C-alpha cells in the first residue's frame, strides 16, 4: 500500500486528504479516491495542472509511497506581467534628492 496525500490550496484555506492506495495508482485515481472535488467543486482536472511536490506531472503518472499530489489553481495574472508591474511600481516610488551646490 502507498501512503499518499492529495492537496488543494486556496488563498484562505488548504485541504489535505490522506489516503492509502494500492501500488500502481496514478494521480488521477488518487484525486478521485480523495473525493476532493466534492469539497471544492471548482476543480476541473481537464483545465488545471497537477503535480507531485511542486513538479508538474501527467494525470497518468504512477505514484510512489509518500507522494503529495497537488492540484494547482489557474493563474490570475501572467507572472511576467506581475513582475513588470512590481518593478514599475518601485520605480515610481523612488524619490531622488538633489543637493544644490
Image (spheres, rainbow, N blue to C red):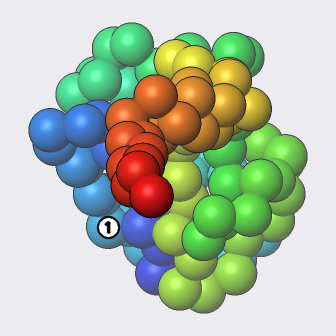
Determine the image quadrant of residue 2: bottom right
Question: Quick one: 33 or 40, which is closer to the camera?
Answer: 40
Instruction: Label 1, secondary structure: give it.
Output: strand
Question: Quick one: 79 or 31, which is closer to the camera?
Answer: 79
Determine the image quadrant of residue 101: bottom left
How many numbered tags mark residues here?
1
Number of residues whose C-alpha sits closer than 10 Å to that of mark 1, classed few (under 14), some (14–19) or many (20 or more): few
Question: Quick one: 50 or 97, which is closer to the camera?
Answer: 97
Q: Position of residue 22 (x, y in %)?
A: 61, 72
Q: Position of residue 45 (x, y in %)?
A: 63, 23
Q: Is residue 66 above or below residue 11?
A: below
Q: Is residue 18 visible?
A: yes
Q: Residue sitting at 81 percent across and 53 percent down?
A: 57
> Dot 1 corresponds to which residue?
18
Could you tell whether 27 is left or right of 30 in the image?
Answer: right
Q: Is residue 7 visible?
A: no
Quadrant for the N terminus, please: bottom right
Could you tell whether 63 is left or right of 35 in the image?
Answer: right
Q: Residue sitting at 23 percent across and 28 percent down?
A: 39
Could you tell whether 20 is left or right of 36 in the image?
Answer: right
Q: Residue sitting at 25 percent across and 37 percent down?
A: 11
Q: Position of residue 6 (x, y in %)?
A: 43, 56
Q: Residue sitting at 53 percent across and 36 percent down?
A: 91
Question: Quick one: 5 or 83, which is closer to the camera?
Answer: 83
Q: Is residue 58 above or below residue 76?
A: below
Q: Position of residue 47 (x, y in %)?
A: 69, 16
Q: Is residue 24 above or below residue 11?
A: below
Report the residue that reaches farthest toward the front.
101
Amino acid at each position: 500500500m502507498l501512503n499518499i496525500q492529495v492537496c488543494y490550496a486556496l488563498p484562505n484555506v488548504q485541504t489535505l486528504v490522506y489516503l492509502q492506495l494500492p501500488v500502481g495508482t496514478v494521480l488521477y485515481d488518487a484525486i478521485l479516491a480523495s473525493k476532493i472535488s466534492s469539497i471544492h467543486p471548482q476543480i476541473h482536472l481537464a483545465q488545471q495542472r497537477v503535480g507531485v511536490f511542486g513538479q508538474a506531472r501527467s494525470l497518468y503518472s504512477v505514484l510512489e509511497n509518500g507522494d503529495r499530489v497537488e492540484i494547482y489553481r489557474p493563474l490570475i495574472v501572467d507572472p511576467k506581467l506581475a513582475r513588470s508591474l512590481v518593478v514599475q511600481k518601485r520605480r515610481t516610488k523612488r524619490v531622488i534628492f538633489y543637493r544644490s551646490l
